[in-house]
Amino acid sequence: MAKKFEPIDIFFEMPLNKWALFDSKTLASSKVVLLHDLKPVVDMFNANGVGIGIRTASEVMSELGLNEHDRRRLVALMNARSFDVYSVRAALNDFLSDQELEQIKIPPKEAERLQQYMNNYSRGLLKVILDGTDVKITGRSSLSSILEGANRGAVLKNLIDIASKLRIEPTEIVVYISKLSEIILAISYYQRIYDSMLPDLREMLVDVKKLHDQPGLGSRFPGIKEETQTALENGRQTIIALNGYFDQFHKVEKFFDEITPEKFKAMRESVETHYRAIGMIVCFWQIKINDWRKRFWDDRGRRRDSTLEQKYNFFKDTIYHNLFTIEDNLTLLKEAKLDL
């Protein structure tokens, strides 16, 4: 039996007190959830932490009398297609101060665990920025810390050279690089979550394949062959698309060796689209896997008894339902050609 998702790894729900974002204490004690049909709702709780039901954004605003500050943030958050840290930052970017935005980040322990994925992506950039210095990067390091100390002059020269190649002002280079670096970090984070989710996805697809191959079910459940085949194909295409994209993206280590304004602009625009698609796809499969696991496995990792009819009906209502929603994003990633 696959392991449960860790709280930091869950993309389909978010406690609204995870970060200090809302004035309303009642709202902050609740959580926002993406259901299996990808509908965003607020799971409400009373002052004692007892669940009082599911609400839409408009219902929450009406019942709680939210101020404009909370209304705008709640609507923006519920328009996100995933509640991972990077999707939340992107969704709320226009509604938060710099100080508030800074609090929305992965924990230090998770950042260290992420380092193995980030190394390839950051090495090329750091090599160019730190050329001619004796700085050694042994962990995650921000541009602000790189600019400190005796190597400041050499680092600034390298940044000015990069700015010249990109035909932008040197004062803008940190903003440019920070934006790309955050997207690269998001993609490396999604890869770690995807890698940990992949055994769960394969396990669920094995169960779907058993339904597909079960003799005699076609006469009892018309459509079962086509529906299970569609699910299997979507799962297969997910694995092909994401594995292929991550393999390609590792080449970003060489990206800064021969940087041009056109190449940089195309890279940044492409990966900004790609990372949103990856986050949505990972979130989508997390929802399906979570629903399947809760229905057919107990907390001790043992399969629950179920009939073929129960399995098929649940499959059709949850796993098969809305499979089409990821097809455009899968096509986008399968056809992605990064000029690295």
Image: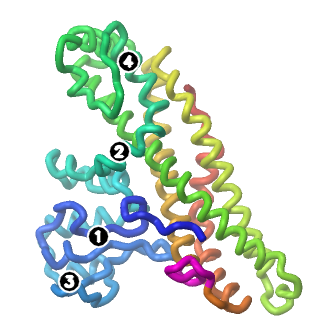
* Residue 6, image quadrant: bottom left
Q: Which residue is mark 1?
A: 15
Measured as percent of width and height from the top left, residue 292 is found at: 58, 77
Q: Main SS of the magenta segment?
A: loop
Assign a secondary structure to mark 3.
helix
The residue under the point 51% across, 47% down is 191
- Along the horizontal axis of the image, is 241 left or right of 300? right
* Mark 2 nearby-residue class (10 Å; few <14, some 14–19, many ≥20): some
Q: Magenta stretch?
A: 294-303
Q: Which mark's residue is nearer the viewer, 1 or 3?
A: 1
- CA–CA distance in space, label 4 to label 1: 41 Å
- CA–CA distance in space, label 4 to label 3: 49 Å
The residue under the point 34% across, 15% down is 130
Query: From what the image shows, is residue 5 above or below residue 137?
Result: below
- Along the horizontal axis of the image, is 187 left or right of 96? right
Q: Which residue is mark 3?
A: 62
Q: Of marks 2 and 4, which one's residue comes earlier in the chain?
A: 2
Assign a secondary structure to mark 1.
strand
Type of the residue with mark 2: Ala
- CA–CA distance in space, label 2 to label 3: 39 Å
- Along the horizontal axis of the image, is 118 left or right of 23? right
Measured as percent of width and height from the top left, residue 184 is found at: 43, 38
Q: Of marks 2 and 3, which one's residue comes earlier in the chain?
A: 3
In this view of the protein, can residue 102 be seen by the observer? Answer: yes
Q: Which residue is mark 4?
A: 166
Q: Of marks 4 and 1, which one's residue comes earlier in the chain?
A: 1
- Picture disc at residue 158: none
Q: Which residue is mark 2?
A: 111
Q: 316 or 9: which is nearer to us? A: 9
